[in-house]
Image (tube, rainbow, N blue to C red):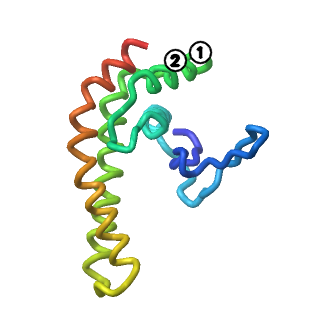
Amino acid sequence: LVISHRDCDPKNVLWNRDSQYYIIDWESAGLINKTKDLLVTAIYWSFNSDYQVDFHRLELFLKTYRQHVAINTSEVTAALYGLLNDWLGWLDFNLTRILQLSSENEEYLLGIAEAKNTLNALPILIEQFPRIIAAVKDI
């Protein structure tokens, strides 16, 4: 396990004009399996707006990482299932939020939007698992 931000995706990194970056939104920080953290971060930085992984970006991310740290390829499949578990947890959170609020509440509408996005994205992500696994093992 490593101590990590655990949500280091593009929405949580701010850049200034001098290309300095600031990582924000640290409420999820904590211990995480190193391989899972690597894959989740690489995938989030490689997604397009339709949840398709840009495999060129993914491979570049992984190659750059591997120049400095070894990747435990025996944990890749488990790490992806861990990511899937995170997304199912997010879906559960939003469905629970919807059930507990009235439809006039702003959080209700956010819960509906997030649940729809997650339900749409899950099959797209799962379909890409074999190619993601192959990309990591080929690096």
**Residue type marked 2:** Lys
Label 2 neighbour load within 10 Å: few <14, some 14-19, many 20+ = some
Residue 83 image point, x, y percent = 35, 43
The disc label shown at residue 67, or none: 1
User: Closest to the observer: 43 or 83?
Assistant: 43
Could you say whether the residue bearing mark 1 is in a helix, strand or loop? loop
> The C terminus is located in which quarter?
top left
**Residue 100 quadrant:** bottom left
In the displayed structure, does residue 57 sit left or right of residue 25? left
The disc label shown at residue 63, or none: 2
**Residue type marked 1:** Gln
User: Closest to the observer: 37 or 126?
Assistant: 126
Residue drawn at (36%, 28%) of the image: 76
Residue 97 image point, x, y percent = 32, 75
Residue drawn at (33%, 87%) of the image: 104
CB atoms at circles 2 and 1 under 8 Å apart?
yes
**Residue 108 quadrant:** bottom left
Residue 58 image point, x, y percent = 44, 26
Residue 43 image point, x, y percent = 42, 35
User: Closest to the observer: 33 or 100?
Assistant: 100
Whole-angstrom CA distance, mark 2 to mark 1, is 6 Å
Could you say whether the residue bearing mark 2 is in a helix, strand or loop? helix
